[in-house]
Image: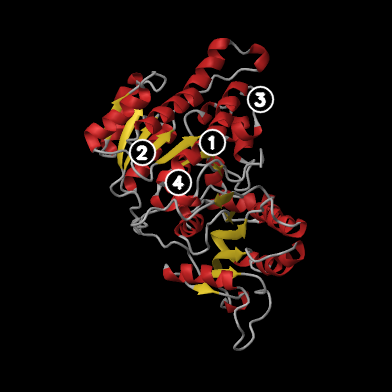
Amino acid sequence: MTDTYLRLVNSGVTKKLAKQLGLPRPAVLRRYEPGQPLVTGPVLVLGRGDSLPPAPDAAPTSPDADVVARVLAGWGLDVRRHPSQLEEGARWGAVVVVLTELEEPTDLSGPMLALGGTLRRIVPSGRIVTVSRAATPDDGPALSAVRVGIDGVLRSVAKELRAGATGNGIVLAGDATLGGPSVAGLLRFFLSSKSAFVDGQLVTVSSDAGVLPGTPGDWEKPLDGKVAVVTGAARGIGAAIAKVLARDGATVVCVDVPAAGDALAKVANQVRGTALQLDITAPDAGDRLLAHALERHGHLDVVVHNAGITRDKLLANMTPDRWDSVVAVNIAAQLRMNEQLLASGKLAEGARIVSLASTSGIAGNRGQTNYAASKAGVIGMVRATGPLLAPTGGTVNAVAPGFIETEMTAKIPALTRQVARRLDSLQQGGLPVDVAETIAFLASPVAGGVNGQVVRVCGQNLVGQ
């Protein structure tokens, strides 16, 4: 499950040889470790008009950018408001481009050219984040053009970045505000090393109302006091999710089939949680899961639907048992469990449900019609279920992994595996922890304004968007 090529081109003689031969050299990504700084270097905040040199005593040219700058400064970051404020030889840790005030496509020129002038001075694993507004049916043609045009800009910039740097976008919709907790929470996630394998993604924040009053402000333990259930937790991505949720303060109920009992107990012991052997396709799986959480821990705040299977076959050779088993585990079980959980009225206020989708459900994949149907179904499910939880501050979202280094992908033929690793902007596969970090963010209290969304954890894979 290791990428030998990645290791070779970043160490010793082979690093020098790869550089001389002009071979692809994917960077070793900066991933989260407790206590590390949020950003390694000063943060530049650009807005409308900020491409011009600052005049003495000039009034702020971008009030919205000033709001974002104050949020960042409140986290103790070294915030600058113009590219000229970087010292000779220094590099930017991150650049945040606030585009919420643009009115027509010609307004993009100033801030984007200013951004372009900074790209050669971004630290390895640096961050570019755009902040914009969603297009609405009431927008005029010019306003709609610039707002949708930002999507193309962000995704293109992300493909140009090097040395493990990423580019992502925050899109404000509904009553979400720049200074609101959900925008701040998403901005912090994108700036942090927790988003190491999230690249080229635009996530919509639709409301400030989803963040409940009294939400804890502890960025190191955002899930402190929460009880979370993770299905398929015995190994791989599921085990990584359980460990990250526990690291962030949650008490975790680890769920898997009885056949995985030993591995399940090991993970549960590692995270100091409880194990529940359960076939999620059972008609009463949701009721049993809820009963366990309430009896053992008193409440249930987070449900992560991670359990899934593949039974790949070309459609011409597909059999009923292969099709039906994949649909039963990957989507039908989730629908039934969610229905039971919501009908019970016993989910905690502000509950979070996060499901595992897949890039196969977005772009399709040869030999995976059954799997793609189930994972696309997950996307449709979260979009329709989100509004059902919104009145109580709850959310339902999905994470769509791309190529992740797991036991399953390790069985792919070596050449195919190498090609798959290089098909994203970061030129490497992700790790299970990358999926887990994104799920942990969506499960956190500050993610209340993100609802019905699908976040790809794929290194900006070339398939799909």
Mark whose residue sits in front, 4 or 3: 4
Q: Where does the image place residue 448, in percent across and percent down from the top left? A: 44, 50
Looking at the image, is mark 1 or mark 4 earlier in the sequence?
1
State the CA–CA distance, disc 3 to disc 2: 31 Å
Residue 442, disc: 4
| Residue sitting nearer the eye, 145 or 170 | 145
Looking at the image, is mark 3 or mark 2 earlier in the sequence?
2
Looking at the image, is mark 4 or mark 3 earlier in the sequence?
3
Element type at mark 4:
helix
Assess disc 4: are there few (<14), some (14-19) or many (≥20) residues with their C-alpha within 10 Å of its C-alpha.
Answer: many
369 up-or-down from 184: above or below: above
Looking at the image, is mark 4 or mark 2 earlier in the sequence?
2
Residue 263 can be seen, yes or no? no
Q: Amino acid at mark 1?
A: Ala
| Circle 3 residue | 366
Q: Amino acid at mark 3?
A: Arg
| Residue sitting nearer the eye, 318 or 413 | 318
Q: Where does the image place residue 120, in percent across and percent down from the top left? A: 64, 65
Mark whose residue sits in front, 1 or 4: 1
Q: Amino acid at mark 4?
A: Leu
Q: Amino acid at mark 2?
A: Ala
Element type at mark 2:
helix
Residue appearing at x 37%, y 57% in the figure: 219
| Circle 1 residue | 384
Q: Is residue 58 left or right of residue 240?
A: right
Mark whose residue sits in front, 4 or 2: 4
State the CA–CA distance, disc 4 to disc 2: 14 Å
**Do residues under tags 3 and 2 come within 8 Å of each other at their CB atoms?**
no
Q: Is residue 314 left or right of residue 384?
A: right
**Do residues under tags 1 and 2 come within 8 Å of each other at their CB atoms?**
no
State the CA–CA distance, disc 1 to disc 4: 17 Å
